[in-house]
Image (cartoon, rainbow, N blue to C red):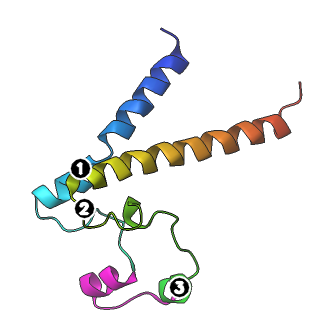
Amino acid sequence: MKLITKLWIGIAALVILSPLGLILPGYFKAGSAWGEWGADEIQKLTGYVPGGLAKFASLWNAPLPDYAFRGWEEKGLGHLSLAYIVSAAAGILIVVIIMLLLARILVKK
């Protein structure tokens, strides 16, 4: 099996396993995933919000907030797991397209 095939199989496995980021924190009652905090969660955890975060927090809005489609936030674990998988696949597709475009631009034939 070629190395690139093994790479894509590994990436596909990670995409399928991506709902674990949703399931495990809930199972262990750990709150949200580490590092995925918004300004409000940082305020609760530390008691303050760093100035840079407060200043730029409203600058970026995620296309799929909380990795879920609009209206799916309360539909249950099955729907949210599917949304996680779609989010992971979409992110990978975007990165692959950007890398292919950059490779075309930067690499001369």
Q: Position of residue 85 (x, y in %)?
A: 38, 45
* Dominant secondary-structure state across the stretch colored magenta: helix
Q: Earlier in the sequence, mark 3 or mark 2?
A: 3
Q: Is residue 45 above or below residue 75?
A: below
The span picked out in magenta is 39-51
| Pick the front one: 20 or 3 | 20
How crowded pointer 3 is (Cα within 10 Å; few <14, some 14-19, many 20+) is rated as few
Q: Is the residue under label 1 in contact with that under label 2 (CB below 8 Å)? A: yes
Q: Residue at x 76, y 36 (%)?
A: 103
Badge 3 is on which residue?
52
Badge 2 is on which residue?
75
Residues at marks 1 and 3, CA–CA distance in whole angstroms: 36 Å
Magenta run includes residue 13: no
Residue type at numbered disc 1: Gly
Left or right of 103 on screen, residue 92: left
Q: Residue at x 49, y 83 (%)?
A: 53
Residue type at numbered disc 2: Lys
Q: Position of residue 10 (x, y in %)?
A: 41, 28
Q: Is the residue under label 2 in contact with that under label 3 (CB below 8 Å)? A: no
Secondary structure, mark 3, is: helix
Q: Is residue 78 above or below residue 70?
A: above
In this rendering, which labeled residue sits more in front, label 1 or label 3? 1
How crowded pointer 2 is (Cα within 10 Å; few <14, some 14-19, many 20+) is rated as few
Q: Quadrant of the C terminus?
A: top right
In this rendering, which labeled residue sits more in front, label 3 or label 2? 2
Q: Position of residue 34 (x, y in %)?
A: 30, 63
Q: Is residue 12 above or below residue 48?
A: above
Badge 1 is on which residue?
78
| Pick the front one: 105 or 16 | 16
